[in-house]
Amino acid sequence: MVNFPDAQAVVRALSPDDAVILNRPHAAARAARFFAEKFPGTAMYAVKANPSPELIRILWDNGINHYDVASIGEVRMVRETLPTAKLCFMHPVKTAGAIREAYFQHGVKTFSLDTLEELAKIVAATTTPEGVAAEDLQLLVRLRVSSEHSELSLAAKFGVDLADAAPLLQATRQHCDALGICFHVGSQAMTPFAYVQALERVRAAIAEAAVTVDIIDVGGGFPSSYPGMEPPPLEDYFAQIHRYFEMLPISYSAELWAEPGRALSAEYSSIVVKVEKRRDDELYINDGAYGALFDAAHVEWRFPVRALEDDLTQPEAEFAFYGPTCDDADYMKGPFLLPADIQANDYIEVGMLGAYGAAMQTRFNGFGATRAFVVEDEPMASLYRGDRVRPVSDNVVSLR
């Protein structure tokens, strides 16, 4: 990759007609070191957030050596990229073939499940042709928890209800070397209380099942900073998680895991887009709902933006975006705050796209960023620089 000081330097040098991705390896490295050093357990990267091999190597080099993979494709890619990484297959519904390949060919020992049917599938798929059952499995039962404190819910699709958890935990205990419980509070959890609530539900499940639990995996949901979504410091999340983990009725040697995805990757990337047309307060740009701005369109995510022109002098105004495809759904409501005199042929940088931006891109209508460059400036927002103004604590954070 070619290195530039910042987005303006890219525009001045290239005047790109197509959208271009800007990567900040130093930002991803800093996030990885933060989690590796401060999370009171094991942080494993949720690969689905951004499956870039380059990013995965950066995280590895800075202390992240466990990876949450959700498909056999991710298993293969991460294993090829990092031959000695620990891979955990945390999708609760897998094919028998994917389980078999992951276990026998790629050394995956850790799997999640939320039904007795999935347990039986894992046990059968990891049994040798001679009928020898695996004795080295780490099996984590996914418990359904609330997503009420998160911006995007993950409470509907996966997870065993608390009322049904005890029989599943008891059955799973019979087929594994280490038993765990995992959950996911939803994406972009805006308060540590999301994890407090979930861990209280974990406590109830363990008490009802009366089994020895060796692993507690608090999943993902760790937030990043976006306009209108300024979370408390991540240290507050870590402190609450550690406190309630320590109070669980679990094995004295039990491990604490987490699956940060967004929090490790969001600051890694931004995108430079060109304004092709202006219609009142709508800007037609060359990336959108079928590109890196999928979330801006489909869940109305407000990413930070900044104009890259030096001659724009008017105060900021609110704009919506249309993407480049022929589809009316290629629309991003925003509002995105930009100088009121922005016009066609001006450039905009859209920040905090390292999480899910690259992962969600398609090539619909032949559009989509294909070039990437390294830039050396800071991301538009960061939870890791130490210069954030601490948000006013709510009554949950004050539980410390």
Image: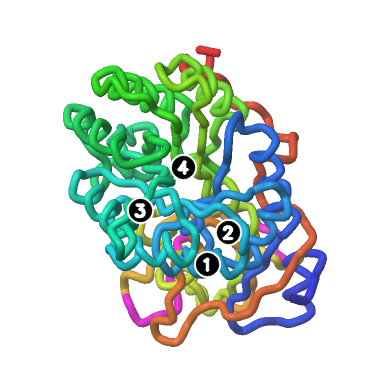
Could you tell me residue 142's position as x and y percent? 32, 40
Q: Amino acid at mark 1?
A: Ala
Toward the viewer: 173 or 134? 134
Earlier in the chain: of badge 2 and badge 3, it is 3
Could you tell me residue 5's position as x and y percent? 82, 65
Q: Amino acid at mark 4?
A: Gly
Q: Amino acid at mark 2?
A: Gly
Whether residue 282 appears in magenta in the rendering, the answer is: no
Please name the residue that numbered disc 4 is placed on: 220
Tell me, yes or no, whether the two marked residues, 2 and 4, touch with CB atoms within 8 Å. no
Which of the two marks, 2 or 4, is nearer to us in this view? Answer: 4
Query: Distance between the Cα atoms at labels 2 and 3?
Result: 22 Å
Query: Distance between the Cα atoms at labels 1 and 4?
Result: 19 Å
Tell me, yes or no, whether the two marked residues, 3 and 1, touch with CB atoms within 8 Å. no
Q: Sort mark 2 into few (<14), some (14-19) or many (20+) by Cα contacts within 10 Å.
A: many
At 79% from the left and 80% from the top, the residue drawn is: 13
Report whether 388 appears left or right of 153.
Answer: right
Q: Is residue 185 visible?
A: no
Query: Distance between the Cα atoms at labels 1 and 2?
Result: 7 Å
Q: Which portion, as a residue range, is magenta? A: 311-327
Query: Which mark identifies residue 358?
Result: 1
Query: Which mark identifies residue 354?
Result: 2
Which of the two marks, 1 or 4, is nearer to us in this view? Answer: 4
Tell me, yes or no, whether the two marked residues, 3 and 4, touch with CB atoms within 8 Å. no
Query: Distance between the Cα atoms at labels 3 and 4?
Result: 13 Å
